[in-house]
Amino acid sequence: MRKLLMVVGFVAATAAGGASAQGYSDGFYLGGGFGNNSLSGFDDATGFQVFAGFPLAASLGQASTAIEVGYMDSGDFDYCVPSFAGELCGSTDAAGLWATGVADYALGPQLSALGRLGLDFGDDDGLMFGVGLGYDVTTELEVRGEYVVRDNIDSLQLNFVFRP
């Protein structure tokens, strides 16, 4: 409950007013991509994520801000451990909804740096944060490379953002 209150407080503080910095358009956007996910003690897994973003009117200095909500599926983490009967093998995965505040800082006309902070509400619930770079291929399409850290799973992601 305390974590949820922290996110709600962040959203309220950043949405309180101010002019929008360049970076996010006036309307919502959709995104999705793939991630190489790491979980200690398991083989890496390839998963996916989908999300929607909602630009906020407030800025953090020169950075524009948004709220993103999404769904992440880690893919299957495989493992094998020795046992008295040979090897015991299996797999596990993680999936769930998440919500983050995002700050996007323009480094040039098409390149930007971004940071995120929020909560994962799924199997790997808890605080999540990340950093990355975005490149505007067109005014409607951005390609992002991000590194996102959750309580147990770290993800190196390639995402595509569509601004209708």
Image: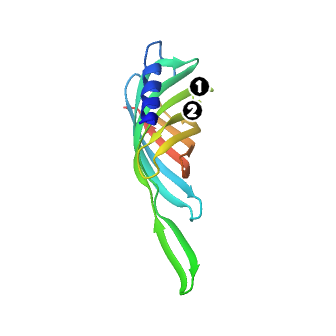
Q: Quadrant of the N terminus?
A: top left
Question: Of residues 90 and 5, which is closer to you in this image?
Answer: 5
Give how far across and how far down residue 152 sits, in percent.
54, 52
Residue at the image point whose x is 39% and y is 49% from the top: 96
As shown in the figure, which amino acid type bears the numbered disc 2? Answer: Leu
User: Is 30 situated left or right of 110 in this image?
Assistant: left
Give how far across and how far down residue 164 sits, in percent.
36, 32
User: Is 33 situated left or right of 131 in this image?
Assistant: left
Q: Kindly give the residue lying farthest to the top in the view shown.
A: 18
Q: Which residue is mark 1?
A: 106
Q: Kindly give the residue lying farthest to the bottom in the view shown.
A: 85
Question: Of residues 37 and 133, which is closer to you in this image?
Answer: 37
As shown in the figure, which amino acid type bears the numbered disc 1? Answer: Ala
Instruction: Return the disc, 2 or 1, that comes first in the chain's sequence.
Output: 1
Q: Quadrant of residue 140?
A: top left
Cα distance between the residues tagged 2 and 1: 9 Å
Residue at the image point whose x is 62% and y is 26% from the top: 108
Label 2 or label 1, whichever lies nearer to me, is 2
Give how far across and how far down residue 137 sits, in percent.
52, 36
Q: Which residue is mark 2?
A: 114
